[in-house]
Amino acid sequence: MAFEFARWRSWAIRDGKPGPPVWVVARRSLSPDPEYKYYLASADEATPLETLALVASTRYQIEQFFEEAKGSLGLADYEARGYASWHHHMSLVALAHLFLMQTRRDLKASEPAMTLPLALELVRAALERPQLTEDDAIRLTVYHLQRNATARASHHKSWLQKHKAKIPKPLL
């Protein structure tokens, strides 16, 4: 993803009166039909635009964490009655996510199609069988990658059949 950023100084409004100075940060996508997003930042006047852009861009990673943690790691599956138990649950989910992302990063060099669910499957297999060998892990990875490729091809074939009329035909 690539974006252009701009900023300008403005003042926040508090109780109908001018409040503290803030940065208004604008983000524009580089696509032919650009999309604009705006952010407010309470950073001081000496903060460079690069820092404001970096902070605004981390939102995507945070949203991705929440999506992965809810879908695969049980972030939303807690029944806490107090702050301490809620905090413990959130901390354990964050640690599990960190561990899986590091496992994925380490294996991605040798297997570019490594996904978070596949890394989770490998960790589950290793926990179920403490003597999981490297060959077993490779076989498990290959099985899941082939299964995912077959499912992707099947979904693509079904989509093509369903949307025959909408596929543009080449002019040549």
Image: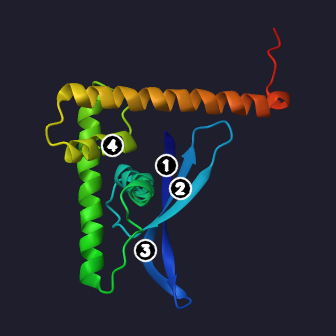
- The mark that comes first in sequence, 4 or 2, is 2
Residue 65 lies, in percent from the top left, at 39, 55
Q: Secondary structure at mark 2?
A: strand
Amino acid carrying label 4: it is Glu
Amino acid carrying label 3: it is Pro
- Residue 39 appears in the figure: yes
* For the residues bearing labels 1 and 4, Cβ distance under 8 angstroms: no
Q: Secondary structure at mark 3?
A: strand
- Residue drawn 57% across the image and 43% down it: 29
Q: In the rendered image, which residue does mark 3 sit on?
A: 21
Q: In the rendered image, which residue does mark 1 sit on?
A: 5
Crowding at dot 1, Cα within 10 Å, few <14 / some 14-19 / many 20+, comes out as some
Residue 156 lies, in percent from the top left, at 65, 30
- Residue 112 appears in the figure: no
Q: Nearer the viewer, mark 1 or mark 3?
A: 1
Viewport quadrant of the C terminus: top right
Q: In the rendered image, which residue does mark 4 sit on?
A: 121
How far is mark 1 from mark 4, CA to CA?
39 Å
Q: Nearer the viewer, residue 72 or 165?
A: 72
How far is mark 3 from mark 4, CA to CA?
49 Å
How far is mark 2 from mark 1, CA to CA?
6 Å
- The mark that comes first in sequence, 1 or 4, is 1
- The mark that comes first in sequence, 2 or 1, is 1
Instruction: Find residue 160 and report its image quarter.
Output: top right
Q: Is 150 placed left or right of 159 in the picture? A: left
- Residue drawn 42% across the image and 29% down it: 145
How far is mark 1 from mark 3, CA to CA?
19 Å
Q: Nearer the viewer, mark 3 or mark 2?
A: 2
Q: Nearer the viewer, residue 58 or 135?
A: 135
- Residue drawn 52% across the image and 82% down it: 13
